């Protein structure tokens, strides 16, 4: 029984999104936004398409984690309670990381 079975999408997807955010180097302080002190919307990323792209990638990451939890290898060798705990933990980590960590970056300049 692999200890990481059922958590691959959570770990690999999270690492990939974190790497992408670090590569894109978004604006994290509102005072650095191009529209600071004015009206209108600006992007925290160099290209405004990433505002929606990151939200889409976060949603796909959450979906991948959910789908992985229903695959047989994720449940193999685990009790029902152990599988349920792993499913809740992976889902919780994914939602919190997406909604409280990655998604708010795109809202900095709006």
Image (cartoon, grey):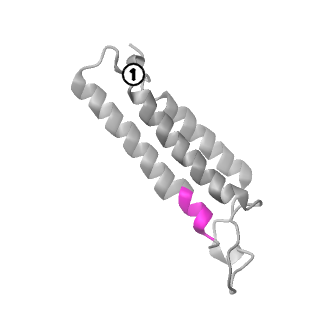
Q: Position of residue 27 (x, y in %)?
A: 68, 65
Q: Position of residue 43 (x, y in %)?
A: 70, 67
* Image side of residue 39 versus residue 61, left or right: right
Specify whether residue 38 is painted magenta: no
- Label 1: which secondary element: helix
Q: Position of residue 91 (x, y in %)?
A: 39, 41
Please state, as top left, top right, bottom left or bottom right, where the C terminus lies in the image.
Answer: bottom right
Q: Mark 1 — residue? A: 74
**Which of 53 and 25 lies nearest the eye of the viewer?**
53
**Which of 57 and 29 lies nearest the eye of the viewer?**
57
Q: Which residues are magenta?
A: 103-108
Q: Residue at x 42, y 16 (%)?
A: 2
Name which quarter of the figure residue 102 lies in. bottom right
Q: Residue at x 45, y 44 (%)?
A: 94
Please state, as top left, top right, bottom left or bottom right, where the N terminus lies in the image.
Answer: top left
Q: Residue at x 55, y 57 (%)?
A: 103
Q: Position of residue 84 (x, y in %)?
A: 28, 31
Mark 1, Cα crowd under 10 Å, few <14 / some 14-19 / many 20+, is many
């Amino acid at each position: 029984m692999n200890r990481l079975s059922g958590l691959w999408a959570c770990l690999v997807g999270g690492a990939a999104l974190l790497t992408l955010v670090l590569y894109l180097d978004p604006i994290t302080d509102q005072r650095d936004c191009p529209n600071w002190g004015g009206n209108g919307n600006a992007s925290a990323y160099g290209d405004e398409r990433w505002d929606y792209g990151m939200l889409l990638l976060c949603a796909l990451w959450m979906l991948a984690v959910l789908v992985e939890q229903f695959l047989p290898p994720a449940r193999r060798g685990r009790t029902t309670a152990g599988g349920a705990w792993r499913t809740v933990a992976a889902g919780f980590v994914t939602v919190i990381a997406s909604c409280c960590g990655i998604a708010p970056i795109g809202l900095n300049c709006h």
